[in-house]
Each structure stands twice: as structure tokens, then as C-alpha cells.
Amino acid sequence: MTGLVYKSTGSWYTVKSESGTFYECRIKGKFRIKGIKSTNPVAVGDVVDFDLDETSDATTGLIHTIHERKNYIIRKSVNLSKQVHIIASNIDKLFLLVTINNPPTTTSFIDRFLVTAEAYDIEAILVFNKVDTFDDSMLDEQLYMQYVYNKIGYKCLRVSSSSLKGIDELKAEMKDNVSMFSGHSGVGKSTLINTLQPGLNLKTKAISEQHSQGQHTTTFAEMFELDFDAKIIDTPGIRGFGVVDMANEELGDYFPEFFALKDQCKFNNCLHKDEPHCAVKDALDKDEISWSRYRSYLQMLEGDEEHYRTDIYGDGKNNDAE
């Protein structure tokens, strides 16, 4: 039988068969996936083949094959630095919730998210949330950010859970797709998802409270079906996902506006930093490329992890009361 993995609890997997029946399944033996050193061989979103085991009282399944993934996202495992934890696979769209204030979402956080999505080959969409709370200066800032990212080719939505602005647009983007939502703690993720599907109480809050106390609780993703023909993968406690290990020479390829100019640089391995006749720096001088994007690129090039951690975790307080 073939099915889709909806939930993982480490040793058991909830799989929905093609006929629509859910089965609790285990993995048959040891899995090795094409050189991925992973702490979890099967992830939510995987398409798997399984056999039914009807020898015990309850009918369970045994997963023996994982179909090829079109993409997957990881976070580095906490204790095993060389291993990765696959958060989810076969994702159609990644939505990043951006707030201008309360809490502010920095452009370096957005850019790191977008680079990661490009590297994982998943469409990323920016969702500016809580737009009903903006004063004039916040509105100016939001519209400028939208202009910067629209110009590069990223889709931007403006939404509000309380006024329902943009909710239909967001639903249209999600229809017939498997989506994931990400963003800082406190950006209104759970409120927004409950607006999209009232009564779907996700686990976002309970987990992040544990997180803020510094406990590394093992958290598992879960897929939910929404009533407008959409699926969403909830990833409790994961505020940022691991940037793929990439060589410095590759980084610029994941900034689409840099990649478009790459062949005009004098050196084919140009890092767009100190090299002469660099098309990216020329475009920067002409204001054709955003300075905030270039600054993010340099931070990532120089491996400014500390800056990133500060961005993600803020002051360490739990802002999830939404």
C-alpha cells in the first residue's frame, strides 16, 4: 500500500493510505537515505509504501520504502552536530510571517529564510501580518519592504486576523498545496492559522514555553487537512530552520538578483565583495540592488551566526501570547 505520512512521534508514524484510511506504522529495519545522516529516516510529508500487519489485535503497518522527495527541510540536531533532523518533506510553499513591530522582523532574518528556501527549492511567500495595527511610519516601512522583495520576484501578501484583510488571498495561495508557516515567536502564527481554520488548535504555544526555558524538547511536525482543500504542516518549537551547508561561492546563487548578474562579473567565481569589475557591486552603486539584501549577504558570507541567533530568539522572552 502507498500512503502519506501525516505525523511522526519518533518510532510510530501516522500514514494516510490512498483509500483515505489512517494507519499507525513502524519502520522496517534500518533505513539509509542517499547519504543523509538523519536522526529520523521518515518525515512528515513523505510518500511511503507499507505492508499491513494484521497479526495483532490492532492493524498496524510496516513502512519499507520511501518515495523520492521533491524537497525537504532540516534543522541541525541539538546534540549530534553532524546529524540533521528532517523537519518535513514535499512542501509546496513556505510562508514567512513578517511583523513590522511587536515583534520586529529584521531583513537579515527574512533574507536568511529566503536563501534557505531557495537552497531547498521551495517557493517562499512573505506574509505581512497585523497590517490593521500599522501607523503611518510602520505602513511606510512595510510598503518599502514589500517593494524590495516584489522587485526581486517574491510574492508578498498583507493580512490581518482581526479584520480578515487578505485572508481569502492567502487561502487561494494555499489551495491544493502543502504549506508551512514560519516566523518569530509572537508574529501571530497560531492566531492566523485559527483564522484560516477555526477550531484547529495547534501546539505552537505549549512548546515554545518549554523552549524559552532552554529545554530542548523533541518536537515533531504534524500535517493537518484544512477545509478549503489545503494541507498545512505544523512544526512546533522550530522558529528557524537550519541553513543548508553551502560553499561561499554558492551563496550568491540563492540571491536571485545577484544570480541574474553573475555572468556579467569579470571573475566567474566572484564573491561580490572585493573583486574588481563586479556587476553586483555596480548594481548596488546604482541602487538597483537593495543595500539591506547586500548587507545580509555579507553577514552570511562571513558566517555571522551570532547575529542570526539574536535575530531568531530576540531577548529570549516568550512572546507567544497571541
Image (cartoon, rainbow, N blue to C red):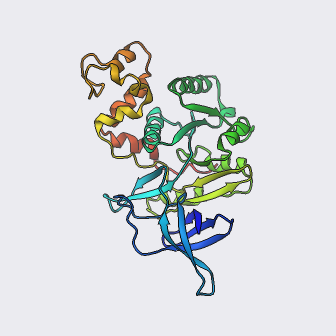
Q: Classify 157 as above or below 90.
A: above
Answer with left or right where residue 244 lies relative to residue 164.
Answer: left
Answer with left or right where residue 190 lies relative to residue 37.
Answer: right
In the rendering, at what x and y percent does residue 273 appear?
A: 28, 25
Where on the picture, by quarter, is residue 283?
top left
Q: Nearer the viewer, residue 66 or 118?
A: 66
In the rendered image, the residue lying farthest to the top is 286
- Is residue 142 visible in the rendered image? The answer is yes
In the rendered image, the residue lying farthest to the bottom is 56
Looking at the rendered image, the quarter that the N terminus falls into is bottom right
Answer with left or right where residue 125 lies relative to residue 159.
Answer: left
Q: Classify 233 as above or below 166.
A: below
In the rendering, at what x and y percent does residue 322 appear?
A: 64, 48
Q: Residue at 41% of width from left, 35% of height from top?
A: 254
Where on the picture, by quarter, is residue 125?
top right
In the rendered image, the residue lying farthest to the front is 1
Where on the picture, by quarter, is residue 52?
bottom right
Q: Residue at 55% of width from left, 75% of height from top?
A: 51
Number of marks drawn: 0
Q: Classify 271 as above or below 245.
A: above
In the rendering, at what x and y percent does residue 74 appear?
A: 43, 53
- Is residue 212 visible in the rendered image? The answer is no
Q: Residue at 39% of width from left, 28% of height from top?
A: 259
Q: Nearer the viewer, residue 117 or 167?
A: 117
